[in-house]
Amino acid sequence: MAQTGSHPLELKSTAEISKIRRAGHLLQRVIMEVARAVDVGVTTLELDRLAKSRIKEAGAIPAFLGMYGFPNTLCVSLNEAVVHGIPNKAPLNEGDLLSIDCGVLLDGFFADTAYTVGVGKCSAEAERLMQVTRESLELAIAKCQPGCRPGDIGHAVQTHVESNGFHVIRDYTGHGIGRHLHEDPKIENFGPAGKGKRLMPGTVIAVEPMVAVGTGDTEVLNDDWTVVTKDRSLSAHYEHTIAITQGGPEILTLAED
């Protein structure tokens, strides 16, 4: 879930990072099961129920459910929707682009991840949008070294996205994460390298490029949640929870070995 509020940054101990990693392992299992269930005719409400069931079976809490009043476990953002889409009973169609965003709270700590998947066969433009967005996340994670600054991360995203003819969403950002879903600092997907305070080992952040084919300008629908591109162009969204350690970045939202 893109940042909508924040708590002050807290550096995490090794034990605390281990707890976030456990939450991240669970979250990755859930979101990959949801992604595999995506198909023509499936509804996003069915996907939401699947995610809620799996999270509760594991003894965790769906992080988004009730957060700021959000009504569901998953944010499901379809085609021109960028983030914060609400699950519903409409069946998915061939060629749709679906961004699935999910968070869990386990043993007092949050993890957050997002993944975009195509429904059946997608257009070449949609496939390229997903590829470039994934690559921008990988480049951003590579910048998460001890002493880096938020601007280094955002600059890596913006440079790759714009060099491929797409645009970053500027109205929503990544964020710190830990005991709270949203902590400082904001992790923007644009801007100059070198901007912001240095991020030291023990910092845990959610890095989440949101990318559009069109201008990147957004508006919120009448449901007061769903953020869409103003020009209704396609959007994609990928996210991982990252720990900055002495040895470099560690992706905490990966499947357990």
Image: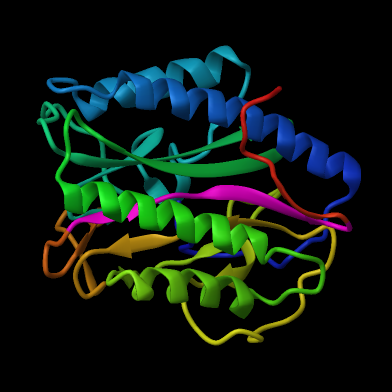
Q: How is the image coloured?
A: rainbow
Q: Residue at x 21, y 22 (%)?
A: 39
Q: Is residue 15 visible?
A: yes
**Taking 154 as reference, is 205 left or right?**
right
- Residue 85 at what x, y percent from top left? 27, 46
- Residue 97 at what x, y percent from top left? 22, 42
- Residue 185 at what x, y percent from top left? 64, 70
> Total of numbered circles in the picture?
0
Q: Nearer the viewer, residue 179 or 247?
A: 247
The chief SS type of the magenta part is: strand
Q: Residue at x 14, y 23 (%)?
A: 40
Q: Is residue 225 visible?
A: no
**Taking 211 as reference, is 97 left or right?**
left
Query: Where are the magenta residues, as a range?
Result: 234-246
**Taking 218 as reference, is 134 left or right?**
right
**Taking 222 as reference, is 164 left or right?**
right
Q: Residue at x 70, y 67 (%)?
A: 8
Location of residue 58 with respect to 179 vertically, above or below: above
